[in-house]
Amino acid sequence: ASPSGAVSGSCTPSGGEKQSLDRRRGKTRIYVGNHIDRWLTLKEKLDFRNDAEVAGFLLDFCKTPKSASSKPIDCFL
């Protein structure tokens, strides 16, 4: 172990690698703000495993043609 407590040869990324991973992850982050409860409810009701599945579903749902009488996405909540 180094003086900082890190173990050499471990599976964890080095400082520079971690910053790079954090930057890449940050580019895919979407903030739902105070709508997080609704997001999580939708995720659970649709039985999705992760947030990317919810996002993909919503994007696909928005591009699907709907009749003027159809209800908004609230029908899932």
Image (cartoon, helix red, strand yellow):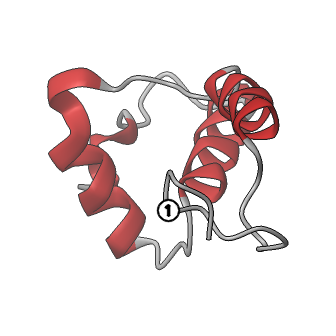
Q: Quadrant of the C terminus?
A: bottom left
- Residue 11: x, y in percent? 78, 72
Residue 44's quadrant in the figure?
A: bottom left
Percent from the top left, x then y, of residue 13? 76, 53
Estimate the x, y position of residue 37 in percent, counting from the top left. Answer: 16, 48
Question: 63 left or right of 34?
Answer: right
Using the image, determine if residue 6 lies above or below residue 60. Answer: below
User: Residue at position x 14%, y 26% from top?
Assistant: 34
Q: Amino acid at mark 1?
A: Gly
**Quadrant housing the N terminus:** bottom right
Query: Label 1: how many residues lie within 10 Å, few (<14), some (14-19) or many (20+)?
Result: few
Of residues 10 and 73, the one nearer the viewer is: 10
Label tally: 1
- The residue at the far front in this view is 3
At x 23%, y 40%, the residue is: 36
Q: Nearer the viewer, residue 69 or 2?
A: 2
Is residue 31 placed above or below 45 in the rendered structure?
above
Residue 9 x/y as whole percent: 85, 72
Tag 1, which secondary structure? Answer: loop
At horizontal 56% and vertical 64% (from top left) the residue drawn is: 50
**In-front residue for pair 2/19:** 2
Task: Locate residue 50 relative to residue 23 in the image: left or right.
Answer: left
| Residue with the mark numbered 1 | 5
The picture quadrant where one finds residue 32 is: top left
Question: In the rendered image, which quarter is residue 59 located in?
Answer: top right
Up the image or down, 55 lies above or below 47; here it is: above
In this rendering, is residue 17 above or below 8?
Answer: above
Q: Is residue 53 left or right of residue 33?
A: right
